[in-house]
Image (cartoon, grey):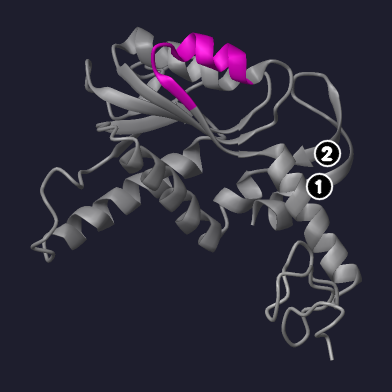
Amino acid sequence: MLAEKSFRLGEFKLSSGATSDYYIDCRATTLDAEGARVTGRVFYDEIHERGWQPHAIGGLTLGADPIVVSVAVLSAQRLRGRASDASASATNFRLIHGFLVRKAEKTHGTGQRIEGFREKGAPVVIVDDVCTTGASTIQAIEAAQEFGFKVEGVICLVDREEAGGRAAVEKAAAPATFVALFTTTEIREEHLRMRQQEADPLFAVRAKCEMCDRPAVTNMPQNRCEVHRG
């Protein structure tokens, strides 16, 4: 979905001021109905598989917003499902609440920068959609720590693999672990594969013949090599 809906080739100016031959608009995926569902799933599964036990997840608005909501909703659905599953222990599933980090403190009302979950000392996971320089992720980490949260981990949907972003986030997050679910290399490859398949629907990219281990040259009706394509 990221390759299909979010990735674009061209000439773009990034928020950092740099230019790039591609652009990734993750919100085209994370705000899509099906995209929101699978986004929540990949973040939730990553948290669960790493054994993290956050009371909440959050990040800098606006990129983190749909991720936070998707995971929070999924955690409630999973907890409800556990009630009817006698084999699931109480520690396997728990509510993961959400919080959002404003880019600046409000100048009215309570003037708070952290919105939503606000339990000092609680373990949390910081999330973001794209990491380029890492600036937005680092702002969220610093705001969470300043508020009094304990940062248990940091997860980014897409690592652009440039501008030293990963190293900067890892330094800010330490000793917590920084995880990137996807890289732009992976998304670009999938995007190009999809374009190639649209241009030549008979060509099965990186597939093997279902009759042998030779590379497939057609996927209509099944993946077949030159020998077995007939």
Q: Residue at x 70, y 27 (%)?
A: 161
Q: Amino acid at mark 2?
A: Tyr
Residue for point 52% across, 30% down:
61
Q: Residues within 10 Å of mark 2 (few under 14, many from 20)?
A: some
The residue that appears at 80% across and 85% down in the rendered structure is 228
Q: What residue span does the magenta drawing correspond to?
A: 166-178
Amino acid at circle 1:
Arg
Question: Label 1 to label 2, Cα distance in Å?
Answer: 5 Å
- Considering depth in this image, is 158 or 61 the residue closer to the camera? 158
| Residue underneath mark 1 | 8
What residue would you read off at disc 2?
22
Q: Is residue 168 magenta?
A: yes
- Of the 4 image quadrants, the one containing the C terminus is bottom right
- Please give left or right for residue 110 compared with residue 193 in the image: left
Numbered disc total: 2
> Quick one: which residue is furthest to the bottom in this view?
230
Please indicate, yes or no, whether residue 105 appears anywhere in the rendered image. no
Do the CB atoms of the residues marked 1 and 2 lie less than 8 Å apart?
A: yes
Q: Position of residue 44 (x, y in %)?
A: 37, 45
- Left or right of 23? Residue 77 is left
At numbered mark 1, what does the secondary structure look like: helix, strand or loop?
Answer: strand
Image coordinates of residue 35 in percent, x first then y, are 55, 57
